[in-house]
Amino acid sequence: MAEEQQSPPRREIVTGVPRGTRRRPPAHTPARSEISEQTTLGATYVRALMRSQLRAGLWALGALALLVGALPLVFVLPGTGSGPLVWVALGLLVYPVMWLIARWYVTRAERNEADFTGLVTDPAEAPGAQRPA
């Protein structure tokens, strides 16, 4: 058997702009222009944001009404009376509950707005997008 001389594999160098940095025209009209031009699609986007914000607000209001609004009914129960437990509940326990509900609402509203912003902005113009130097 004769040994055949094998040449090392040939290396190829690819030159050009990396795929992620190329700017392609959007396949559709960006949603931001739909909103600014007040088209039906833009109105639908805005209505969806308003609906999600309203839904979050109604959930927060419902939770507040159930948790804090039910306290007078608990105080009417026999055995609770008007002792220090009532004043502790009204003076100390209600405020952390209200704070937690408010904190949840603010977080949810910010998430709704971030989702909406992500929907209407062009990915190349996003704040975290890397721009070529």
Image (spheres, helix red, strand yellow):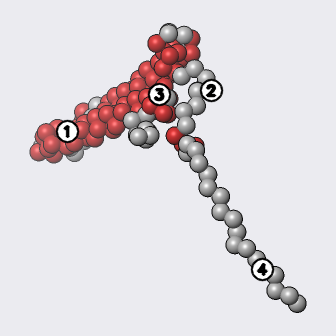
**Which tag is nearer the camera, tag 1 or tag 3?**
3
Q: Which of marks 2 and 3 is in front?
A: 2
Of the numbered discs 2 and 3, the one sitting upstream in the chain is 2
Relative side of 110 to 2, left or right: left
Q: How crowded is mark 2: few (under 14 residues within 10 Å), some or many (20 or more)?
A: few
Q: Which numbered mark, 2 or 1, is in the foreground of this view? A: 2
Whole-number angstrom distance, CA of label 4 to CA of label 3? 58 Å
Judged from the image, the secondary structure of the residue bearing numbered disc 2 is loop
Give neighbour class at mark 4: few <14, some 14-19, many 20+ (Cα, 10 Å).
few
State the residue in front, 43 or 89: 43
- Disc 3: which residue: 121
Q: Can residue 81 be seen in this view?
A: no
Please report the residue visible at 59 percent of the width from the left and 48 percent of the height from the top: 15
In front of the other: 3 or 73? 3
Looking at the image, which residue sits at the far right? 1
Query: Is the Cβ of the residue at disc 4 closer than 8 Å to that at disc 2?
Result: no
Give the label on residue 27, or none: 2
Q: Is mark 1 on a helix, strand or loop?
A: helix
Pointer 4 or 3: first along the chain: 4
Question: Mark 4 to mark 2: distance in Å?
Answer: 52 Å
Residue 60 position, x and y percent, is: 35, 31
SS under mark 3: loop
* Mark 4 lies on residue: 5
Specify which label sits upstream in the sequence, 1 or 3: 1
Residue that label 1 marks = 95
- Disc 2 marks which amino acid? Ala
